[in-house]
């Protein structure tokens, strides 16, 4: 009936699955270690954004705001008052920081 039957054999499929499994075993543990680094960089980026908004408010109003004042005047959102890891931002004399 069919003279030209081409396809993958069972051995070929098992070899491909083994290679994919080895790659997954090597990559997944390395991804778990990066979450703390991502949170740290996300927090420092957020501090930079809020600092820029604090400076913009100071230029317009000639006084340093609090985080609540920035949020109520739509300079930042309520979500931008805390870092992704849950650390609260603070403003002291116009300097934004995230206590560690």
Image (cartoon, rainbow, N blue to C red):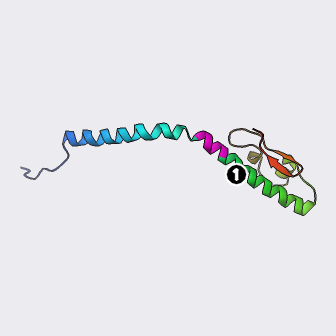
Q: Which residues are magenta?
A: 35-40
Q: Which residue is mark 1?
A: 45
Q: Residue at x 88, y 63 (%)?
A: 59
Which is more toward the observer, 30 or 18? 30
| Residue 16 percent location from the top left of the image | 28, 43
- Badge 1 marks a residue whose secondary structure is helix
Name the image quarter holding the C terminus: top right
| Residue 66 percent location from the top left of the image | 87, 48
Q: Which secondary structure type mostly characterizes the magenta part of the structure? A: helix
Which is more toward the observer, 74 or 58? 58
Q: Is residue 23 above or below residue 59?
A: above
**Hey, which residue is sitting farthest bottom in the picture?**
60
Q: Is residue 75 visible?
A: no
Q: Residue at x 79, y 44 (%)?
A: 89
Q: Residue at x 90, y 50 (%)?
A: 93
**Hey, which residue is sitting farthest right in the picture?**
62
Q: Residue at x 68, y 39 (%)?
A: 85
Occupied quadrant, residue 20: top left
On screen, residue 34 versus residue 92, left or right, reads left
Q: Is residue 36 magenta?
A: yes
Occupied quadrant, residue 60: bottom right
Q: Is residue 61 magenta?
A: no
């Amino acid at each position: 009936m069919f003279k030209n039957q081409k396809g993958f054999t069972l051995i070929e499929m098992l070899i491909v699955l083994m290679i994919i499994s080895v790659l997954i075993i090597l990559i997944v543990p390395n991804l778990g270690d990066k979450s703390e680094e991502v949170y740290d960089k996300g927090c420092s980026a957020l501090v930079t954004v809020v600092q820029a908004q604090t400076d913009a408010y100071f230029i317009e109003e000639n006084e340093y705001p609090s985080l609540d004042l920035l949020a109520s005047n739509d300079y930042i959102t309520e979500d931008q008052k805390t870092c992704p890891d849950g650390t609260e931002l603070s403003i002291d004399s116009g300097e934004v920081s995230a206590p560690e």
